[in-house]
Image: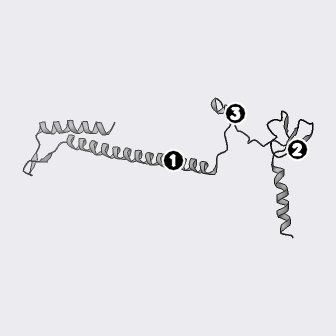
Amino acid sequence: MIRIAPLALCLLVLPAWADLYKWTDENGKVHYSDQPPPTTIKKTETIKPEKQPAQAAAPTGDAAAKPAAPKSAAEQEMEFKKRRLQAAEAEAKAQKDAQAEEEKKRNCKRAQDQVAAMQNGGRITRYGPNGEQVFLSDQEIAKEVVEAKKTADSWCK
C-alpha cells in the first residue's frame, strides 16, 4: 500500500499541469474541461494559460512574425556538432596559415643570406655540364645577384 500511494499522488498531480478551459454552451450551461471546447462555441476562456518561454530580445523583421519553436534535442545536437566542426576547420585553417607564414619567413631569410653571400665577393662556383665545378665571371655573378635579389623580394613581400 505504501508503494502505491506515491504513484496515486503523481497521477492526481498530472491533470494540474494541463490547461483548463471554461465555456458556456447554447443552453447556458457552464463547462470546465482540460480539452478545448468544440468549434461551435463562440466564447471560451482559458483558466490556466500555457506558460510562454521568456525571450531575451525582441526579434525584428520576419523573426518577429514567427515565434521560435523550441528545438528538439536532436536539432540541438546537430547544431552543436556543426559549431564544433566549424571551430575545428577554423583552427586547422589558422594553423595552416601560420605554417605557411613561417615557411615564407624561412625562405626570405635564406634568399637574403644568399644575396649577402654573393655581394660579399669571393669566388662563386656552379656545376658545369660535365659535372665539374665552374667558377663564375664577374658579369655572371652580377646576373646571379640580380636574380637572387628578385627571389628575395618575392619571398620577403
The residue most toward the bottom is 1
**Where residue 157 sits in the image (x, y, percent)?**
34, 36
Give the residue pinned by disc 2.
Answer: 32
| Pointer 1 or 3: first along the chain | 3
Residue at left offset 86%, top offset 70%: 2
**Where residue 140 sits in the image (x, y, percent)?**
13, 38
Front-most of residues 99 and 128: 99
Q: Quarter of the image holding residue 104?
A: top left
Residue at left offset 61%, top offset 48%: 76
| Pointer 2 or 3: first along the chain | 2
In the structure shown, which secondary structural element does the residue marked by tag 2 occupy? Answer: strand
**Where residue 75 sits in the image (x, y, percent)?**
60, 48
| Pointer 1 or 2: first along the chain | 2
Comparing marks 1 and 3, which lies closer to the viewer? 3
Q: Does residue 5 sit above or below 49 in this rendering?
A: below
Front-most of residues 123 and 45: 45
Q: Tell me which amino acid carries mark 2.
A: Tyr
**Where residue 116 sits in the image (x, y, percent)?**
24, 42
Give the residue pinned by disc 3.
Answer: 58
Separation of residues labelled 2 and 3 (CA atoms):
35 Å
Say the numbered circle drawn on residue 87: 1
Front-most of residues 38 and 52: 38
The residue most toward the top is 61
Q: Circle 3: is it few (<14), some (14-19), or many (20+) Cα within 10 Å? A: few
In the picture provided, is 149 more to the left or to the right than 68? left
Q: Quarter of the image holding residue 70?
A: top right
Q: Tell me which amino acid carries mark 1.
A: Ala
